[in-house]
Image: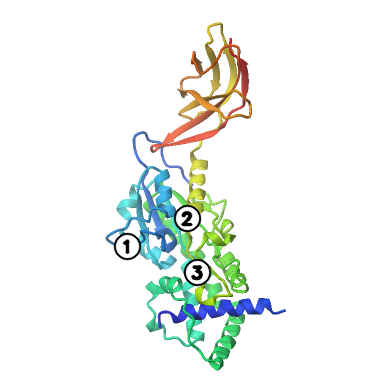
Amino acid sequence: MRKRICSFLTLLCLLAASICASPGTAYAKASGQQAVYTAFGDSIAAGYGLSGYTDSQDTPAAPAKSYQALTAAFLKTKSQNYAVTGSDSDDCIELLTSQKADADLAATDVITLSIGSNDLLLPFIQIVMDDFQIDPSAIDPAQIEDQIKNGFTLPQLDLSQMAEYYKKAEALLTELSDHATLHAQARAFAENFQTILSLLHEKAPDAEIYVTNIYNPFAFLPKIGELADRYIQEINQAFSKDAPDYTLIDVYTPFQEQELTNVQADFQHPASLSLDPHPSVQGHAVIADLIIRACKDAHSPKPAVLRSLYSDSKKKLTAQIKLPADADGYQLLYAADKKGTYKKLGKGTSGQKTFQTSSKKLKSQKTYYFKVRSYQVVKGVTYYGKDSNILKIKIS
């Protein structure tokens, strides 16, 4: 029984293929202290399917190649993992109101949230079960995602049964094109998402919140991908890229690429189909990179300005630097060619506006190019600003 749902989903995809073939608030700076990072969400956040994944409550650490672990490594800390496989927005609200995470949230600096996929997936599977007269009590909701990943053995059917299933599947595709239940789920999620945000802000008022939207794991599949996209875009309307109280991480756009999920659909060999919608190792790396870039955008200081350069007869170089107020210091970089590779010559603090050096790295009578890069340190992580203007000088 546990593999029948997946078989029906596979049949839907096969049918679809045949149809198409026919005609935030920044956390405070602090030196010598690690950031506290807490992850909430579903199986995507939990790293489902990756090496090292477990849903055991005794080993809550996320897999090493999950976006959660990669983000924690960038922040030079460990994540507090409250991601639960199979969770939808109702489950997330229940977790946050249970006070289970309150102590960790009170000290949290950074929160990531991946929620909403199951708000569509679970009712979709319920619709399939109803149409194919599968007894819901025979299915364990906590194992649905596992069934999707591992259940693709096509049912043994004679031709008359196959024709009946294809007829039902074709009718189901039509039904799903505009289904009231799925529209209602999208609206309900929008309300739940605001409740989740309110709870997170209440329990972690100083934390930065990074929220991933919903991607379409079946984007490249005929018919099914189009149907899924209709509701995914609808549920993604709950998120705002301009929200003042969280940062939206857009995973929908890059996940149009097939290799970022575990979905494998070779319709010439249907027995090997995999409709596992979870991110692949590459997919987790992409999500982590997007979150890390957002962290950098939040904390990188404004660029410094290299005002002037002077070299005296003793080969001493003097640089005058204007540093932005949000920087802790700067690096002075040099290169023999303007478009060449720049190396660090030295660094200075925010109170050191004049930089002087007699470094042996600089050769007499040779021209060098210089620029400055500002930085600030937040909870042990160094964030760099954009490079300054470039000046050149011939060393005396």
Give me the C-alpha separation between circle 1 and circle 2.
29 Å
Q: Residue at x 58, y 75 (%)?
A: 268
Query: Residue at (30%, 64%) from the top-left corner?
Result: 56
- Residue 277: x and y in percent read 49, 66
Decide: few, some or many residues near mark 3? Use Cα within 10 Å; few <14, some 14-19, many ≥20.
Answer: some
Residue topped by disc 2: 284
Q: Nearer the viewer, residue 231 or 342?
A: 342
Q: Decide: is 157 above or below 348.
A: below
Q: Position of residue 332 (x, y in %)?
A: 52, 24
Marks 2 and 3, how far apart at CA: 28 Å
For this orientation, the residue located farthest to the top is 313
Q: Nearer the viewer, residue 63 or 112?
A: 63
Mark 3 lies on a secondary structure that is helix
Quadrant position of residue 73: top left
Q: Amino acid under label 1?
A: Ser
Q: CA distance from mark 1 to mark 3?
A: 21 Å
Q: Nearer the viewer, residue 124 or 242?
A: 124
Residue 69 relative to residue 14: left or right? left
In front of the other: label 2 or label 3?
A: 2
Residue 98 is marked as: 1
* Colour theme: rainbow
Q: What residue is disc 3 on?
A: 188
Classify residue 394 as left or right of residue 193.
Answer: right
Q: Amino acid at mark 2?
A: His
Element under disc 2: helix
